[in-house]
């Protein structure tokens, strides 16, 4: 993808603050961090979002995420981290090349948590039905 900023970064066409790379995955600091050590883990091959990314690349990304998250926590003395994949515009995705945010967290760091609402049984059934539809089209 010629106009994709993350493709350009992983091909070293534009600079980044790299913390790790291997053949398939790159990890670099987010240019507008939500917390110190906020790192993006990016499969090098271009796919628009998590849902259309091949499983093998997601597995490799997760292997890297575990190590980079540990390193980011150690480096910043964080007490935890959030792993976030904003997927599609309604969820705030602005760069359409699959990536995962690792955001180091501290107690009382002031970052907002999700709101908690009532669980609806109807949602459970609808999600189960949608899962069954997917699985009958394409089993695991
Ligand atoms: P999103 O698509 O909402 O998950 O967010 C994309 C993230 O990429 C944002 O947090 C940006 O700050 C970050 N970002 C955009 N351009 C760059 C860049 N050149 N280097 C590092 N991070 C970037
Ligand atoms: Zn790309």
Image (cartoon, grey):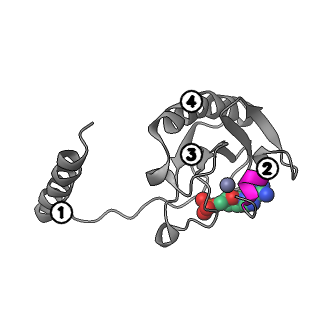
122 left or right of 109 in image:
left
Q: Is mark 2 within 8 Å of ligand 1?
A: yes
Q: Residue at x 62, y 67 (%)?
A: 94
Magenta span contains residue 7: yes
Please name the residue that numbered disc 2 is placed on: 9
Question: Looking at the image, is mark 2 or mark 4 earlier in the sequence?
Answer: 2
65 left or right of 40 in image:
left
Residue 70, given in percent of the width and then of the height, sits at 62, 29
Question: Looking at the image, is mark 3 or mark 1 earlier in the sequence?
Answer: 3
Residue 30 seen by the camera: no
Q: Give the dominant element type of the magenta stretch: helix, strand or loop.
A: helix
Residue 101, given in percent of the width and then of the height, sits at 60, 49
Magenta span contains residue 137: no
Please name the residue that numbered disc 1 is placed on: 123
The stretch of residues the image draws in magenta is: 4-8
Question: Looking at the image, is mark 4 or mark 3 earlier in the sequence?
Answer: 4
Residue 122 seen by the camera: yes
Please name the residue that numbered disc 4 is placed on: 66
């Amino acid at each position: 993808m010629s106009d994709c900023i993350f493709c350009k970064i992983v091909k070293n066409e534009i600079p980044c603050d790299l913390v790790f790379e291997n053949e398939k995955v790159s990890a670099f600091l987010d240019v507008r961090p939500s917390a110190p050590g906020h790192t993006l883990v990016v499969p090098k091959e271009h796919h628009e979002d998590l849902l259309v990314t091949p499983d093998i690349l997601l597995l490799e990304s997760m292997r890297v995420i575990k190590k980079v998250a540990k390193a980011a926590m150690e480096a910043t003395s964080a007490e935890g981290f959030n792993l976030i994949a904003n997927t599609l515009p309604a969820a705030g995705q602005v760069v359409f090349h699959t990536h995962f945010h690792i955001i180091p967290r501290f107690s009382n760091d002031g970052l907002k948590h999700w709101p908690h609402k009532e669980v609806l049984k109807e949602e459970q059934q609808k999600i189960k039905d949608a899962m069954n539809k997917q699985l009958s089209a394409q089993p695991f």
